[in-house]
Image (cartoon, coloured by chain):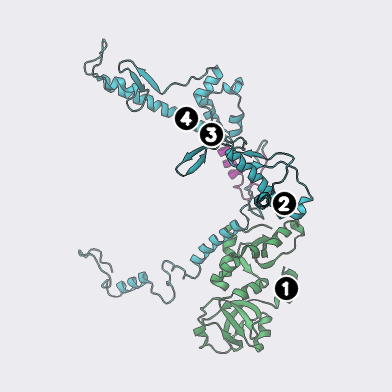
Amino acid sequence: MDVTQQLAEFAAANSTAVLERPNPVITDAGLLAAFDNTPIDPEEYANLNPHVLALTLTSTQALISAIFTLPTKSTSSGPVVNLPTPVTLLPREKPLPKPKPPTKWERFAAAKGISHKKRDKDVWDDEKQEWVPRWGKGGKNREKEDQWLHEVKQGEGADLDPAKTARTERKARIAKNEKQHAANLSIAANAPKPISTLRDPTFKSSSSLSDSQEVKQSSRNKRKAELERSMLISKTSTASLGRYDQKIEGEPKVKGVKRKFEANVGTGGFEGEREKALGVLKRVESTVGKPKKAKKGGEGEEGGLNVRKAVRFASKQDGGKGRVVGKTGKGKRK
Amino acid sequence: MRPLTEEETKAVFEKLANYIGKNLVHLIDRDEDDAYCFRLHKDRVYYLPLPMLHLATSVARPNLVSLGTCFGKFSKSGKFKLGITCLDWLAKYAKYKVWIKPSGELPFLYGNHVAKAHMGRITEDTPEHQGVVVFNMGDVPLGFGVTARSTLDTRKLDPTGIIVFHQADVGEFLRDEDTMF
């Protein structure tokens, strides 16, 4: 019996038609991706769906065969492949973080050409024969506070508590550091952004500006703006709103506030606009349909009773009998 | 042409809510393929389908005369006034309606208030000072106004008493043709 024909038939029925690609399909098993770089043939696109299906089949087969070449591990749930690290470089999702504004020390170090050496967090303790943290819990910096014996120097009073002095000194150092940190933050916040980012630390005239000078300048700018504002107000405080006043040289120009409206076709699209309108509608609905609040001393809502007025009326009519008066009777009024 | 600011939107919605109440949500919350929006152009508020908005963006502001349905305009003091051009939308969603007899149609269309003698029907439980849309007996919207009395109080009124204060009517299409759009 000759089964070759049957075998051939079976193979033909079960084989998948894979396209011949002039450029090989590039696979990246790490990303489970296949890239087909062959240029598009316009004639094939006349019959689009089967063609795309064939393309997909080709790429998928290339990817699967690439995965099957990888070394497998057999586990209880079947053979498992460890995917290699991806080869394709993907662009960074987020922009690079902005550089932090330099602290006072960093600016000084840059000006002086001091290279910063990072200190280890841990220091070697010779007595304990182990690494201890420089600061924090069990830190080296509170060694003096915790030691059981203190050396008293010549001339130091007997009532001096060395542990306490060491602690106050440490606390003072912390306070000083916090103050410096706050100053750095405020300088970074106050500094005009483009200047601080453009500033070249090696440029002498700008780097020679000390921080106190910078703070002074920013406060000076603030004062100047205030002064200009009050000047503008006083200039328009005449009967003619300053129209016939004499102009002074270098007088600041009045800049009004520009009205700002949303874009005609907004960034949020129709959805965003609808959400906004529905939000307004909710607020409108909460006010519409409800009776208006009775004015103080008014007649109250229609058909209702103005309790305040009624109480006053009743209490006036019969000498305060309508009102509950305190037990002493002191609050009685006629 | 620009979208309405929040205060403007509030003014428009408050005015519309007088007539169509909670149905106002149907003007805003619409299907994606039947989307409408409010736009302000030269102090007038227009209600227009979204595709029309995209077309109108290419028309320069001085050349743009009108677009969509004009709902009304903002007065110089920032109050919103409904115009007769919005009648079709109001009539579609109106909550309270007044029908007037054929004999009362002409007086109303000349800009007069609706007297009791001319009133054919009125929606049950209409409160006082409620925005209503005025129809003729053939259910053709003629205009809108504000009720002078609630439905209950109208029974006691004499035939010459005013039921609906006139606000706008379709006669304006002829009378105020020049300034309408």
> Real-space Cα distance between discs 1 and 4?
68 Å
Q: Give the image quarter of residue B80.
A: bottom right
Read off the chain for label 3: A
- Mark 1 lies on residue: B176
- Residue A183's disc is 4
Residue tagged by mark 2?
A51
Q: Which numbered mark, 2 or 4, is in the foreground of this view?
A: 2
State the residue in front, A65 or B7: A65
Tag 4 or tag 3, which sits nearer the N-term?
A: 4
Type of amino acid under label 1: Asp
Identify residue type, mark 3.
Answer: Asn
Q: Are marks 2 and 4 in contact (CB under 8 Å)?
A: no
Task: In the picture, one chain is green; tell me its letter.
Answer: B
Q: Quadrant of residue A143?
A: top left
Find residue A75 and name its label: none
> Would you place residue A138 above or below residue A234 in this image?
above
Q: Secondary structure at mark 2?
A: helix
Q: Which residues are magenta?
A: A225-247
Report crowding for label 2: few under 14, some 14 to 19, many 20 or more residues within 10 A (C-alpha).
Answer: some
> In the rendered structure, the residue with mark 4 lies on which chain?
A
Task: Quickly name the residue at label 3.
Answer: A190
Q: Nearer the viewer, mark 1 or mark 4?
A: 4
Asked whether A273 or A296 is in front, the reply is A273
Residue found at x 48% / y 39%: A74
Q: Earlier in the sequence, mark 2 or mark 4?
A: 2
Q: Position of residue A6 (x, y in %)?
A: 66, 52
Q: Would residue A177 be counted in the magenta stretch?
A: no
Q: Chain of mark 2?
A: A
